[in-house]
Protein backbone atom coordinates (compact mmCIF):
# COMPACT_ATOMS: atom_id res chain seq x y z
CA UNK A 1 0.00 0.00 0.00
CA UNK A 2 1.18 3.53 -0.80
CA UNK A 3 2.08 4.87 2.63
CA UNK A 4 0.95 8.37 1.60
CA UNK A 5 -2.64 7.95 0.54
CA UNK A 6 -4.85 10.90 -0.20
CA UNK A 7 -8.31 11.05 1.32
CA UNK A 8 -9.87 10.15 -2.02
CA UNK A 9 -7.56 7.16 -2.44
CA UNK A 10 -8.02 5.91 1.12
CA UNK A 11 -11.76 6.37 0.90
CA UNK A 12 -11.96 4.28 -2.27
CA UNK A 13 -9.90 1.51 -0.68
CA UNK A 14 -12.02 1.54 2.48
CA UNK A 15 -15.20 1.42 0.42
CA UNK A 16 -13.79 -1.59 -1.45
CA UNK A 17 -12.78 -3.19 1.89
CA UNK A 18 -9.15 -3.22 0.74
CA UNK A 19 -8.00 -0.91 3.53
CA UNK A 20 -8.97 -1.06 7.17
CA UNK A 21 -9.57 2.27 8.96
CA UNK A 22 -7.75 0.77 11.94
CA UNK A 23 -4.71 -0.04 9.79
CA UNK A 24 -4.72 3.45 8.30
CA UNK A 25 -5.00 5.01 11.75
CA UNK A 26 -2.10 2.94 13.07
CA UNK A 27 0.05 4.03 10.11
CA UNK A 28 -0.62 7.66 11.03
CA UNK A 29 -0.01 7.04 14.75
CA UNK A 30 3.30 5.36 13.92
CA UNK A 31 4.26 8.29 11.71
CA UNK A 32 3.41 10.72 14.50
CA UNK A 33 5.58 8.72 16.90
CA UNK A 34 8.45 8.69 14.41
CA UNK A 35 8.43 12.31 13.30
CA UNK A 36 6.46 14.67 15.49
CA UNK A 37 9.20 15.07 18.07
CA UNK A 38 10.99 17.15 15.43
CA UNK A 39 7.93 18.71 13.79
CA UNK A 40 5.88 19.69 16.87
CA UNK A 41 2.73 19.72 14.77
CA UNK A 42 0.57 18.17 17.51
CA UNK A 43 -0.20 19.79 20.85
CA UNK A 44 -2.12 16.68 21.88
CA UNK A 45 -2.36 13.24 20.29
CA UNK A 46 -5.70 11.62 21.13
CA UNK A 47 -4.63 8.03 20.52
CA UNK A 48 -7.42 6.35 22.47
CA UNK A 49 -10.06 8.47 20.73
CA UNK A 50 -8.45 7.78 17.35
CA UNK A 51 -8.50 4.02 17.89
CA UNK A 52 -12.11 4.17 19.09
CA UNK A 53 -13.14 6.24 16.06
CA UNK A 54 -11.25 3.88 13.75
CA UNK A 55 -12.86 0.85 15.37
CA UNK A 56 -16.31 2.31 14.83
CA UNK A 57 -15.49 3.10 11.20
CA UNK A 58 -14.17 -0.40 10.72
CA UNK A 59 -17.41 -1.86 12.08
CA UNK A 60 -19.39 0.27 9.64
CA UNK A 61 -17.16 -0.90 6.81
CA UNK A 62 -17.70 -4.55 7.78
CA UNK A 63 -21.46 -4.11 7.92
CA UNK A 64 -21.70 -2.10 4.69
CA UNK A 65 -22.83 1.01 6.53
CA UNK A 66 -20.06 3.49 5.71
CA UNK A 67 -21.19 7.09 6.08
CA UNK A 68 -19.39 8.48 3.04
CA UNK A 69 -15.98 9.50 1.72
CA UNK A 70 -14.64 10.70 5.08
CA UNK A 71 -15.54 7.59 7.06
CA UNK A 72 -12.39 6.20 8.67
CA UNK A 73 -10.16 9.09 7.55
CA UNK A 74 -7.57 10.32 10.12
CA UNK A 75 -7.79 14.08 10.65
CA UNK A 76 -6.69 16.71 13.17
CA UNK A 77 -8.16 19.96 14.38
CA UNK A 78 -6.33 23.25 14.83
CA UNK A 79 -6.25 23.92 18.56
CA UNK A 80 -8.65 26.84 18.42
CA UNK A 81 -11.49 24.47 17.50
CA UNK A 82 -13.37 23.40 20.61
CA UNK A 83 -13.45 19.66 21.17
CA UNK A 84 -15.73 18.22 23.86
CA UNK A 85 -13.72 16.83 26.75
CA UNK A 86 -10.44 17.37 24.90
CA UNK A 87 -8.04 20.16 25.85
CA UNK A 88 -8.28 23.20 23.56
CA UNK A 89 -5.54 25.71 24.27
CA UNK A 90 -5.15 28.13 21.35
CA UNK A 91 -1.45 27.34 21.91
CA UNK A 92 -1.60 29.79 24.82
CA UNK A 93 -0.72 29.77 28.49
CA UNK A 94 -4.04 31.50 29.13
CA UNK A 95 -5.98 28.40 28.05
CA UNK A 96 -3.39 25.80 29.02
CA UNK A 97 -5.94 23.76 30.98
CA UNK A 98 -9.09 24.64 29.04
CA UNK A 99 -11.35 21.64 28.37
CA UNK A 100 -14.50 22.62 26.45
CA UNK A 101 -17.82 21.00 27.19
CA UNK A 102 -18.87 20.89 23.56
CA UNK A 103 -17.57 20.53 20.03
CA UNK A 104 -17.34 23.35 17.51
CA UNK A 105 -20.03 22.93 14.86
CA UNK A 106 -17.59 21.93 12.12
CA UNK A 107 -15.92 19.46 14.50
CA UNK A 108 -19.35 17.88 14.93
CA UNK A 109 -19.84 17.83 11.15
CA UNK A 110 -16.61 15.94 10.53
CA UNK A 111 -17.30 13.54 13.41
CA UNK A 112 -20.73 12.83 11.97
CA UNK A 113 -19.04 12.09 8.63
CA UNK A 114 -17.01 9.36 10.35
CA UNK A 115 -13.56 10.97 10.57
CA UNK A 116 -10.95 9.65 13.00
CA UNK A 117 -9.76 12.35 15.40
CA UNK A 118 -5.97 12.02 15.81
CA UNK A 119 -5.51 15.07 18.01
CA UNK A 120 -5.15 18.82 18.32
CA UNK A 121 -2.75 20.70 16.12
CA UNK A 122 -0.36 23.56 16.78
CA UNK A 123 -1.32 27.12 15.92
CA UNK A 124 0.15 30.54 16.38
CA UNK A 125 -1.09 31.78 19.75
CA UNK A 126 -4.79 32.62 19.35
CA UNK A 127 -4.16 32.43 15.59
CA UNK A 128 -1.88 35.49 15.43
CA UNK A 129 1.12 35.25 17.76
CA UNK A 130 3.82 33.21 16.13
CA UNK A 131 6.22 31.65 15.53
CA UNK A 132 6.76 31.99 19.28
CA UNK A 133 9.35 30.34 21.49
CA UNK A 134 8.03 31.64 24.82
CA UNK A 135 4.82 29.58 24.98
CA UNK A 136 4.14 26.28 26.80
CA UNK A 137 4.65 24.41 23.49
CA UNK A 138 7.18 25.01 20.71
CA UNK A 139 6.10 26.19 17.26
CA UNK A 140 5.49 23.67 14.48
CA UNK A 141 8.34 23.07 12.03
CA UNK A 142 8.24 22.69 8.28
CA UNK A 143 8.59 19.01 7.27
CA UNK A 144 10.41 19.98 4.08
CA UNK A 145 13.16 21.34 6.35
CA UNK A 146 12.57 21.61 10.10
CA UNK A 147 14.84 24.64 10.34
CA UNK A 148 12.23 26.51 8.34
CA UNK A 149 8.92 28.21 9.07
CA UNK A 150 5.52 26.65 8.34
CA UNK A 151 3.79 30.02 8.08
CA UNK A 152 0.77 30.49 10.26
CA UNK A 153 -1.41 30.45 11.96
CA UNK A 154 -2.61 26.97 10.96
CA UNK A 155 0.98 25.83 11.33
CA UNK A 156 0.37 22.40 12.85
CA UNK A 157 -2.17 21.46 10.22
CA UNK A 158 0.19 22.47 7.43
CA UNK A 159 3.06 20.45 8.87
CA UNK A 160 0.99 17.40 9.84
CA UNK A 161 -0.72 17.10 6.45
CA UNK A 162 2.52 17.56 4.50
CA UNK A 163 4.23 14.90 6.61
CA UNK A 164 1.31 12.49 6.26
CA UNK A 165 0.60 12.41 9.99
CA UNK A 166 -3.05 13.12 9.15
CA UNK A 167 -4.81 13.09 5.79
CA UNK A 168 -6.57 16.38 6.39
CA UNK A 169 -7.28 18.96 9.03
CA UNK A 170 -8.97 22.17 9.94
CA UNK A 171 -7.44 25.59 9.61
CA UNK A 172 -8.76 29.05 10.20
CA UNK A 173 -8.03 32.08 8.06
CA UNK A 174 -8.32 35.70 9.18
CA UNK A 175 -5.58 37.17 6.99
CA UNK A 176 -4.14 34.09 5.31
CA UNK A 177 -3.78 31.48 8.06
CA UNK A 178 -4.97 28.58 5.88
CA UNK A 179 -3.36 29.67 2.61
CA UNK A 180 0.02 30.71 4.06
CA UNK A 181 0.80 27.33 5.67
CA UNK A 182 -0.66 25.56 2.65
CA UNK A 183 1.82 27.41 0.44
CA UNK A 184 4.89 27.00 2.63
CA UNK A 185 4.15 23.36 3.50
CA UNK A 186 3.32 22.43 -0.09
CA UNK A 187 -0.28 21.31 0.42
CA UNK A 188 -3.73 22.60 -0.56
CA UNK A 189 -5.94 24.77 1.61
CA UNK A 190 -9.10 26.70 0.90
CA UNK A 191 -10.55 29.67 2.68
CA UNK A 192 -14.22 29.42 1.74
CA UNK A 193 -16.58 32.33 1.28
CA UNK A 194 -17.33 34.19 4.51
CA UNK A 195 -20.48 32.58 5.87
CA UNK A 196 -20.17 29.19 4.14
CA UNK A 197 -18.73 27.35 7.17
CA UNK A 198 -19.75 27.87 10.76
CA UNK A 199 -17.34 29.60 13.15
CA UNK A 200 -19.32 28.65 16.26
CA UNK A 201 -17.10 26.98 18.84
CA UNK A 202 -13.92 28.26 17.21
CA UNK A 203 -12.00 30.78 19.31
CA UNK A 204 -12.41 34.15 17.58
CA UNK A 205 -9.68 36.48 16.38
CA UNK A 206 -11.58 38.99 14.25
CA UNK A 207 -15.31 38.51 13.83
CA UNK A 208 -15.69 40.02 10.37
CA UNK A 209 -12.56 38.42 8.91
CA UNK A 210 -12.46 34.94 10.50
CA UNK A 211 -13.11 31.95 8.24
CA UNK A 212 -12.96 28.22 8.96
CA UNK A 213 -11.78 25.87 6.24
CA UNK A 214 -9.97 22.63 5.35
CA UNK A 215 -6.37 21.77 4.48
CA UNK A 216 -5.23 18.57 2.77
CA UNK A 217 -2.62 17.14 0.41
CA UNK A 218 -4.74 17.67 -2.70
CA UNK A 219 -7.44 20.00 -3.97
CA UNK A 220 -9.86 17.09 -4.37
CA UNK A 221 -9.35 16.19 -0.70
CA UNK A 222 -10.08 19.80 0.27
CA UNK A 223 -13.33 19.54 -1.69
CA UNK A 224 -14.32 16.38 0.18
CA UNK A 225 -13.52 17.96 3.54
CA UNK A 226 -15.24 21.24 2.71
CA UNK A 227 -18.37 19.40 1.58
CA UNK A 228 -18.70 17.96 5.08
CA UNK A 229 -17.82 21.25 6.76
CA UNK A 230 -20.08 23.73 4.97
CA UNK A 231 -23.68 24.59 5.73
CA UNK A 232 -25.98 26.97 7.50
CA UNK A 233 -25.65 27.30 11.28
CA UNK A 234 -28.36 29.29 13.03
CA UNK A 235 -25.96 29.83 15.92
CA UNK A 236 -23.41 31.72 13.82
CA UNK A 237 -24.72 35.22 13.03
CA UNK A 238 -22.60 35.38 9.86
CA UNK A 239 -23.72 32.00 8.53
CA UNK A 240 -25.16 32.01 5.01
CA UNK A 241 -28.56 30.42 4.51
CA UNK A 242 -27.92 29.23 0.97
CA UNK A 243 -27.67 25.48 0.24
CA UNK A 244 -24.23 23.96 -0.33
CA UNK A 245 -23.71 22.64 -3.87
CA UNK A 246 -21.94 19.39 -4.77
CA UNK A 247 -18.32 20.53 -4.69
CA UNK A 248 -16.90 17.56 -6.60
CA UNK A 249 -19.55 17.18 -9.30
CA UNK A 250 -17.55 19.17 -11.89
CA UNK A 251 -14.08 18.92 -10.38
CA UNK A 252 -12.74 16.74 -13.21
CA UNK A 253 -13.99 18.92 -16.08
CA UNK A 254 -10.75 20.89 -16.55
CA UNK A 255 -10.21 24.59 -17.14
CA UNK A 256 -11.70 24.78 -20.63
CA UNK A 257 -13.97 27.79 -20.93
CA UNK A 258 -12.90 29.41 -17.67
CA UNK A 259 -12.30 33.17 -17.83
CA UNK A 260 -9.23 33.84 -15.74
CA UNK A 261 -7.83 37.18 -14.57
CA UNK A 262 -4.20 37.44 -13.49
CA UNK A 263 -3.56 40.12 -10.85
CA UNK A 264 -0.02 40.46 -12.12
CA UNK A 265 0.77 43.73 -10.34
CA UNK A 266 0.11 42.12 -6.93
CA UNK A 267 3.00 39.64 -7.28
CA UNK A 268 5.24 41.43 -9.81
CA UNK A 269 5.38 45.02 -8.53
CA UNK A 270 3.34 45.51 -5.31
CA UNK A 271 5.27 42.75 -3.49
CA UNK A 272 7.58 41.02 -5.98
CA UNK A 273 7.77 37.26 -5.53
CA UNK A 274 10.75 34.93 -5.89
CA UNK A 275 11.78 33.54 -9.26
CA UNK A 276 10.44 30.10 -8.29
CA UNK A 277 7.05 31.48 -7.25
CA UNK A 278 6.77 33.52 -10.44
CA UNK A 279 7.74 30.46 -12.47
CA UNK A 280 5.03 28.45 -10.69
CA UNK A 281 2.36 31.06 -11.35
CA UNK A 282 3.31 31.28 -15.02
CA UNK A 283 3.25 27.49 -15.22
CA UNK A 284 -0.28 27.45 -13.86
CA UNK A 285 -1.32 30.11 -16.37
CA UNK A 286 0.23 28.07 -19.20
CA UNK A 287 -1.62 24.94 -18.08
CA UNK A 288 -4.93 26.79 -17.96
CA UNK A 289 -4.35 28.36 -21.36
CA UNK A 290 -3.41 24.99 -22.84
CA UNK A 291 -6.62 23.51 -21.45
CA UNK A 292 -8.69 26.16 -23.17
CA UNK A 293 -9.14 28.88 -20.58
CA UNK A 294 -9.28 32.54 -21.54
CA UNK A 295 -6.53 34.52 -19.76
CA UNK A 296 -6.15 38.26 -19.30
CA UNK A 297 -4.53 40.62 -16.82
CA UNK A 298 -6.57 42.47 -14.20
CA UNK A 299 -5.69 45.69 -12.42
CA UNK A 300 -6.97 46.37 -8.92
CA UNK A 301 -5.96 48.82 -6.21
CA UNK A 302 -2.42 48.15 -4.96
CA UNK A 303 -1.98 45.21 -2.60
CA UNK A 304 -1.18 47.54 0.30
CA UNK A 305 -4.56 49.27 -0.15
CA UNK A 306 -6.28 45.95 0.59
CA UNK A 307 -3.94 45.04 3.44
CA UNK A 308 -4.23 48.28 5.39
CA UNK A 309 -7.96 48.19 6.20
CA UNK A 310 -7.74 44.44 6.66
CA UNK A 311 -5.08 44.68 9.33
CA UNK A 312 -6.66 47.69 11.06
CA UNK A 313 -9.99 45.85 11.27
CA UNK A 314 -8.27 42.66 12.41
CA UNK A 315 -6.19 44.33 15.12
CA UNK A 316 -9.12 46.35 16.42
CA UNK A 317 -11.50 43.42 16.59
CA UNK A 318 -8.83 41.15 18.08
CA UNK A 319 -8.08 43.75 20.74
CA UNK A 320 -11.78 43.91 21.59
CA UNK A 321 -11.74 40.12 22.10
CA UNK A 322 -8.61 40.11 24.24
CA UNK A 323 -8.74 43.44 26.08
CA UNK A 324 -9.85 42.06 29.47
CA UNK A 325 -7.06 39.46 29.51
CA UNK A 326 -4.51 41.92 28.15
CA UNK A 327 -5.27 44.23 31.06
CA UNK A 328 -5.11 41.50 33.67
CA UNK A 329 -2.57 39.00 32.32
CA UNK A 330 -0.49 40.89 29.75
CA UNK A 331 2.67 38.92 30.40
CA UNK A 332 0.93 35.54 30.24
CA UNK A 333 0.66 36.05 26.48
CA UNK A 334 3.68 35.38 24.31
CA UNK A 335 5.62 38.45 23.26
CA UNK A 336 4.52 38.35 19.62
CA UNK A 337 0.84 38.03 20.46
CA UNK A 338 0.71 40.77 23.08
CA UNK A 339 2.84 43.23 21.14
CA UNK A 340 0.85 42.76 17.94
CA UNK A 341 -2.46 43.21 19.74
CA UNK A 342 -1.42 46.44 21.44
CA UNK A 343 -1.81 48.25 18.12
CA UNK A 344 -5.53 47.54 18.30
CA UNK A 345 -5.73 49.63 21.47
CA UNK A 346 -4.44 52.65 19.54
CA UNK A 347 -7.13 52.63 16.83
CA UNK A 348 -9.84 55.24 17.43
CA UNK A 349 -13.48 54.42 16.80
CA UNK A 350 -13.68 56.70 13.78
CA UNK A 351 -10.59 55.07 12.30
CA UNK A 352 -12.14 51.61 12.61
CA UNK A 353 -15.25 52.86 10.83
CA UNK A 354 -13.10 54.46 8.13
CA UNK A 355 -11.40 51.12 7.59
CA UNK A 356 -14.83 49.48 7.22
CA UNK A 357 -15.85 52.12 4.68
CA UNK A 358 -12.63 51.45 2.76
CA UNK A 359 -13.44 47.75 2.92
CA UNK A 360 -16.80 48.26 1.25
CA UNK A 361 -15.22 50.29 -1.56
CA UNK A 362 -12.68 47.51 -2.14
CA UNK A 363 -15.42 44.85 -2.18
CA UNK A 364 -17.20 46.85 -4.87
CA UNK A 365 -14.00 47.23 -6.86
CA UNK A 366 -13.40 43.47 -6.71
CA UNK A 367 -16.98 42.67 -7.70
CA UNK A 368 -16.74 44.94 -10.74
CA UNK A 369 -13.34 43.54 -11.75
CA UNK A 370 -14.75 39.99 -11.70
CA UNK A 371 -17.95 40.80 -13.56
CA UNK A 372 -16.78 38.96 -16.67
CA UNK A 373 -14.30 36.61 -15.01
CA UNK A 374 -14.65 33.26 -13.22
CA UNK A 375 -11.44 33.23 -11.21
CA UNK A 376 -8.39 35.33 -10.37
CA UNK A 377 -4.80 34.19 -9.96
CA UNK A 378 -1.91 35.59 -7.94
CA UNK A 379 0.70 34.32 -5.48
CA UNK A 380 -0.10 32.73 -2.12
CA UNK A 381 3.20 33.69 -0.52
CA UNK A 382 6.22 35.65 -1.64
CA UNK A 383 8.68 32.75 -1.72
CA UNK A 384 9.52 29.43 -0.14
CA UNK A 385 9.64 29.26 3.66
CA UNK A 386 12.30 31.32 5.45
CA UNK A 387 14.22 29.92 8.40
CA UNK A 388 11.98 29.93 11.45
CA UNK A 389 14.27 32.27 13.39
CA UNK A 390 14.34 34.76 10.51
CA UNK A 391 10.63 35.63 10.54
CA UNK A 392 10.30 39.38 11.21
CA UNK A 393 8.21 40.41 14.20
CA UNK A 394 6.46 43.15 12.24
CA UNK A 395 6.11 41.34 8.92
CA UNK A 396 2.43 42.26 8.77
CA UNK A 397 3.29 45.98 8.95
CA UNK A 398 6.28 45.83 6.61
CA UNK A 399 5.02 43.99 3.51
CA UNK A 400 1.50 43.40 2.22
CA UNK A 401 0.38 39.79 1.99
CA UNK A 402 -1.32 38.22 -1.04
CA UNK A 403 -3.96 36.60 1.13
CA UNK A 404 -5.48 39.46 3.14
CA UNK A 405 -7.35 41.01 0.16
CA UNK A 406 -9.69 38.04 0.05
CA UNK A 407 -10.40 38.14 3.78
CA UNK A 408 -11.34 41.78 3.24
CA UNK A 409 -13.71 40.83 0.39
CA UNK A 410 -14.78 37.49 1.87
CA UNK A 411 -14.55 35.60 -1.42
CA UNK A 412 -13.20 32.01 -1.68
CA UNK A 413 -9.46 31.57 -2.16
CA UNK A 414 -7.41 28.40 -2.58
CA UNK A 415 -3.67 27.92 -2.23
CA UNK A 416 -1.96 24.97 -3.85
CA UNK A 417 1.57 23.87 -4.63
CA UNK A 418 3.04 25.18 -7.88
CA UNK A 419 6.61 23.97 -7.60
CA UNK A 420 9.72 24.10 -5.44
CA UNK A 421 12.26 26.83 -4.79
CA UNK A 422 16.02 26.82 -4.89
CA UNK A 423 16.15 25.47 -1.35
CA UNK A 424 13.87 22.56 -2.21
CA UNK A 425 10.88 23.92 -0.30
CA UNK A 426 7.47 24.39 -1.93
CA UNK A 427 5.93 27.54 -3.37
CA UNK A 428 2.25 28.27 -3.86
CA UNK A 429 -0.23 29.82 -6.27
CA UNK A 430 -3.55 31.29 -5.19
CA UNK A 431 -6.84 30.87 -7.07
CA UNK A 432 -9.71 33.15 -6.11
CA UNK A 433 -13.39 32.87 -7.02
CA UNK A 434 -16.59 34.84 -6.79
CA UNK A 435 -18.53 34.56 -3.51
CA UNK A 436 -19.96 31.05 -3.00
CA UNK A 437 -18.33 29.77 -6.20
CA UNK A 438 -16.05 27.31 -4.37
CA UNK A 439 -16.83 24.61 -6.92
CA UNK A 440 -15.26 26.70 -9.70
CA UNK A 441 -12.18 27.45 -7.59
CA UNK A 442 -11.75 23.77 -6.75
CA UNK A 443 -12.29 22.75 -10.37
CA UNK A 444 -9.54 25.12 -11.52
CA UNK A 445 -7.21 24.07 -8.73
CA UNK A 446 -7.70 20.39 -9.47
CA UNK A 447 -7.20 21.00 -13.20
CA UNK A 448 -3.80 22.53 -12.53
CA UNK A 449 -2.79 20.07 -9.81
CA UNK A 450 -3.62 17.07 -12.00
CA UNK A 451 -1.59 18.44 -14.88
CA UNK A 452 1.38 19.58 -12.81
CA UNK A 453 2.31 16.36 -10.97
CA UNK A 454 3.78 18.20 -7.97
CA UNK A 455 1.87 15.76 -5.75
CA UNK A 456 4.27 12.89 -6.45
CA UNK A 457 6.84 14.27 -4.00
CA UNK A 458 6.71 14.21 -0.17
CA UNK A 459 9.21 15.74 2.25
CA UNK A 460 12.43 13.72 2.49
CA UNK A 461 12.04 13.66 6.26
CA UNK A 462 9.10 11.27 6.00
CA UNK A 463 9.64 9.89 2.50
CA UNK B 1 6.08 66.50 14.11
CA UNK B 2 7.22 63.00 15.16
CA UNK B 3 5.87 61.63 18.40
CA UNK B 4 8.40 61.51 21.24
CA UNK B 5 8.98 58.29 23.19
CA UNK B 6 7.49 60.01 26.23
CA UNK B 7 4.32 61.04 24.40
CA UNK B 8 4.03 57.55 22.94
CA UNK B 9 4.39 56.09 26.43
CA UNK B 10 1.61 58.35 27.71
CA UNK B 11 -0.59 57.24 24.83
CA UNK B 12 -0.02 53.62 25.79
CA UNK B 13 -0.73 54.39 29.45
CA UNK B 14 -4.13 55.74 28.43
CA UNK B 15 -5.08 52.30 27.05
CA UNK B 16 -5.06 50.87 30.56
CA UNK B 17 -2.45 48.27 29.65
CA UNK B 18 0.52 47.77 31.96
CA UNK B 19 3.65 47.83 29.83
CA UNK B 20 7.23 48.11 31.01
CA UNK B 21 9.48 50.80 29.57
CA UNK B 22 11.29 48.12 27.58
CA UNK B 23 8.01 46.89 26.09
CA UNK B 24 7.03 50.46 25.21
CA UNK B 25 10.38 51.00 23.54
CA UNK B 26 9.94 47.96 21.29
CA UNK B 27 6.54 49.24 20.19
CA UNK B 28 7.79 52.79 19.73
CA UNK B 29 10.35 51.59 17.20
CA UNK B 30 7.60 50.04 15.08
CA UNK B 31 5.09 52.88 15.53
CA UNK B 32 5.93 54.59 12.19
CA UNK B 33 5.03 51.37 10.36
CA UNK B 34 1.71 51.20 12.19
CA UNK B 35 0.99 54.88 11.57
CA UNK B 36 1.60 54.43 7.83
CA UNK B 37 -0.81 51.52 7.70
CA UNK B 38 -3.44 53.38 9.71
CA UNK B 39 -3.16 56.41 7.43
CA UNK B 40 -3.60 54.22 4.38
CA UNK B 41 -6.67 52.54 5.87
CA UNK B 42 -8.32 55.81 6.81
CA UNK B 43 -7.71 57.94 3.73
CA UNK B 44 -10.67 60.25 3.02
CA UNK B 45 -13.73 58.82 1.28
CA UNK B 46 -16.86 60.48 -0.09
CA UNK B 47 -19.20 61.56 2.70
CA UNK B 48 -21.84 59.06 1.62
CA UNK B 49 -19.50 56.03 1.55
CA UNK B 50 -21.05 53.29 3.69
CA UNK B 51 -19.10 50.91 5.93
CA UNK B 52 -18.94 47.20 5.16
CA UNK B 53 -21.34 46.23 7.90
CA UNK B 54 -24.77 44.70 7.75
CA UNK B 55 -27.23 45.38 10.52
CA UNK B 56 -29.93 42.75 10.78
CA UNK B 57 -32.88 44.15 12.71
CA UNK B 58 -34.52 40.78 13.02
CA UNK B 59 -31.82 38.89 14.91
CA UNK B 60 -32.12 35.24 14.17
Image (cartoon, coloured by chain):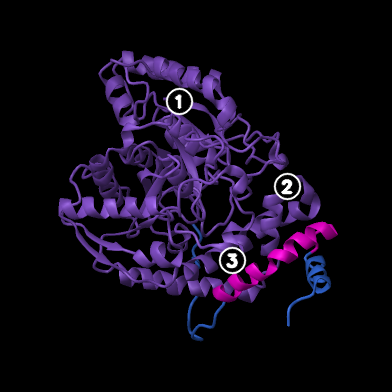
Q: Residues within 10 Å of mark 2 (few under 14, many from 20)?
A: many
Q: Is residue A279 above or below residue A228?
A: below
CA distance for labels 2 and 3? 21 Å
Residue sitting nearer the eye, A88 or A232? A88
Palette colour of chain B = blue
Q: Which mark is residue A312?
A: 3
Q: Position of residue A23 (x, y in %)?
A: 40, 14
Disc 3 or disc 1, which is closer to the eye?
1
- Quarter holding residue A420: top left
Q: Position of residue A350 (x, y in %)?
A: 62, 76
Q: Nearer the viewer, residue A276 or A314?
A: A276
Colour in which chain A is drawn? purple
Q: Are marks 1 and 2 in contact (CB under 8 Å)?
A: no
Q: CA distance from mark 3 to mark 1?
A: 40 Å
* Magenta stretch in the rendered image: B16-41
Q: Position of residue A261 (x, y in %)?
A: 28, 63
In the rendered image, residue B27 lying in the magenta stretch gets the answer yes
Residue occupied by mark 2? A333
Within-10-Å neighbours for mark 3: few <14, some 14–19, many 20+: many
Distance from the alpha carbon under mark 1 to that under mark 2: 33 Å
The answer, for residue B53, to whether it is visible in the render is: no
Residue A207 shown in magenta: no
Q: Are marks 3 and 1 on the same chain?
A: yes
Q: Residue at the location (56% across, 24% down)?
A: A46
Q: Earlier in the sequence, mark 3 or mark 1?
A: 3
Return the residue at label 1: A462
Q: Quadrant of the C terminus of chain A?
A: top left
Amino acid sequence: MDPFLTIAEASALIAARKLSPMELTRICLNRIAAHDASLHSFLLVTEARALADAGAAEARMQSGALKGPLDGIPIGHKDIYSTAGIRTTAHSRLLEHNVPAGDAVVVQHWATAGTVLMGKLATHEFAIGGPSFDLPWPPARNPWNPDHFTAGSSSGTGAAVAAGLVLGGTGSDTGGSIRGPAALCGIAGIKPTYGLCSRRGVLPLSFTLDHTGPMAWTVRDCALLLQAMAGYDAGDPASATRPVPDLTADIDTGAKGLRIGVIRHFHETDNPVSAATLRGIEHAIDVFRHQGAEIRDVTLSPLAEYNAPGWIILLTEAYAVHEPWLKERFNDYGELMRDRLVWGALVRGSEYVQALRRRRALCEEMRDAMADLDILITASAVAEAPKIHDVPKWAMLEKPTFTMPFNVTGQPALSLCCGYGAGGLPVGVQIIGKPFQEATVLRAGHAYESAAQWRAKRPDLVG
Amino acid sequence: MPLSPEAFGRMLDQTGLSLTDAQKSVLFDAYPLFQAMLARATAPLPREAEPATVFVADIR
